[in-house]
Structures are given as C-alpha cells and as structure tokens.
Image (spheres, rainbow, N blue to C red):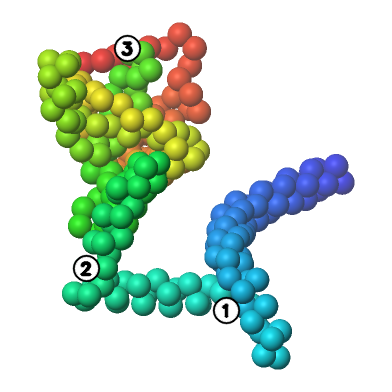
C-alpha cells in the first residue's frame, strides 16, 4: 500500500515538474532574449554616457542608451521624410555606391534591410512544398519572388525563388531556384509554417491536429507493425 502511495506521489511530482518546465521555458527564454537585446542596444552608448556623465557630475541610469538610440532613429526618420533630408540621403547614397569595396557591402545591406523592414510587402509570400533534397522527400519553403530572366533563359523553365529555412533557426537557410510547376502551394499561413519548422514538426497547424488525433485513435500511438493504410 505504501509502495503504491509513493509511486503515485512520485508520478504526480514528475507531472507537475514537467508541466512547470513547459510553462516556464518559453517565458524565461523570451524574457532572457529581450533582456539580452536590450542590454546590447543599451551598451552601445554606455562608454559615451559614462564619460560625459563623469565630466558633469551625473550618473547615467540603465536604459538611457536604449532610449537615446530609439530617439536617434525617430529623428533620422523624421529628417529623411522632408525635402532636405531626402536630398541629403540621396547624396550619401551616391557617395557610398561609388566608393570601391564599400559599394558592394552598402548596396547588399541596403537591399536586405529594405526587403525585411519595408511594410509595403512581405518577404515570405507563401508557404510551399517541394521535393528536396531528393525525389520522394519533401521540404517546406517560402516563395520570395519570381526568378530573374537570366535564370529562366539558362534553364528554359519558369522558376521561382524559394527560401528554404533551417530547423530550429529559420533565420538561416538556402536560396533555391525551383521550376514553378514543381512546387505545391500549401493552404497554411506563413506564420503557421514557421512554427512547424521551428518546432521540428511538433507544432501542427490547428486544422491539421484533428486528423492526427483521429489517426492515433484508429491505430493507438502508432500504426501496428505490418499494417498498411489503404489509399483510395
């Protein structure tokens, strides 16, 4: 009897422990990443403020650097929104694009930042399925744009630019040029597809969960050995 009670208590403790981990890990990780980002941004002007503060007898407070950078970004945005700012920006743009070595780096960073920060259109347009890395094996990627004309002339096919993210870090990945006829559009949002990729396939879109649960009800946790599902 005592053994059963100890087993029951131990089982409940394990359930509570792992339930606590499931709840706390995403909360703590999110707070930590936000704090890390805040600390990095706040520390950019830390040396300047401490040097200036010591000279005038003031002690800078935590977050001053972060707030200052936010204000600087807003002021720059305000400045380049008027006529004088736009002309000055065009002048610097022409200068950087004409400098050797600098022009390549500047142009690349400029285009990437405009693509990801511009609110005019989304970078990842649609989630698609395609055969990769071999025939019969499928990967999830995202259409970024139609391919350029030279690629179509060289391949003789109408291709599409596909971004193939890695798991669990979707910020890195590969650019693939795939014939348009070889991609299969998915009826899920980009956000749902990203969750699927980041979780390694464990977080399914809501409308797909019911099918998986029905399959588990039919076969248990997994189909019995030697059982083949009939295809109609």
Secondary structure under tag 3 reads loop
Which of 197 and 40 lies nearest the eye of the viewer?
40
Residue at 68 percent across and 54 percent down: it is: 16
What's the distance in space between the residues labelled 1 and 2, CA to CA? 31 Å
Q: What residue does disc 1 label? A: 64
Q: Residues within 10 Å of mark 3 (few under 14, many from 20)?
A: few
**Residue 162's x, y, as percent?**
28, 32
When the figure is inspected, residue 195 is found, relative to residue 158, above or below; the finding is below
What's the distance in space between the residues labelled 1 and 3, CA to CA? 55 Å
Residue at 44 percent across and 42 percent down: it is: 171
- Image-based side of 5 in relation to 54, left or right: right
Q: Is residue 10 visible?
A: yes
Which of 183 and 108 lies nearest the eye of the viewer?
108
Q: What residue does disc 3 label? A: 135
Specify which label sits upstream in the sequence, 1 or 2.
1
Q: Residues within 10 Å of mark 2 (few under 14, many from 20)?
A: few
What's the distance in space between the residues labelled 3 and 2, CA to CA? 53 Å
Q: What residue does disc 2 label? A: 87
Q: Residue 216 occupies which quadrant of the picture? A: top left
Specify which label sits upstream in the sequence, 3 or 2.
2
């Amino acid at each position: 009897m005592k053994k059963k009670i100890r087993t029951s208590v131990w089982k409940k403790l394990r359930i509570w422990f792992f339930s606590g981990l499931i709840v706390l890990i995403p909360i703590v990780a999110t707070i930590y990443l936000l704090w890390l980002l805040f600390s990095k941004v706040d520390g950019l002007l830390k040396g300047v403020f401490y040097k200036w503060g010591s000279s005038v007898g003031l002690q800078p407070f935590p977050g001053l650097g972060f707030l200052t950078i936010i204000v600087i970004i807003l002021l720059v945005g305000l400045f380049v929104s008027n006529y004088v700012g736009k002309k000055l920006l065009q002048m610097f743009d022409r200068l950087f694009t004409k400098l050797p070595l600098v022009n390549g780096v500047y142009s690349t960073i400029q285009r990437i930042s405009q693509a990801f920060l511009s609110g005019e259109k989304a970078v990842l347009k649609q989630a698609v399925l395609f055969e990769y890395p071999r025939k019969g094996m499928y990967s999830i990627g995202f259409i970024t744009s139609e391919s350029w004309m030279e690629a179509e002339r060289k391949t003789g096919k109408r291709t599409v630019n596909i971004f193939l993210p890695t798991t669990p870090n979707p910020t890195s990945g590969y650019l693939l040029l795939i014939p348009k006829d070889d991609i299969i559009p998915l009826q899920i949002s980009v956000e749902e597809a990203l969750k699927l990729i980041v979780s390694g396939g464990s977080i399914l879109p809501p409308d797909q969960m019911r099918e998986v649960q029905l399959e588990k009800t039919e076969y248990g946790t997994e189909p019995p050995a030697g059982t083949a599902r009939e295809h109609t």
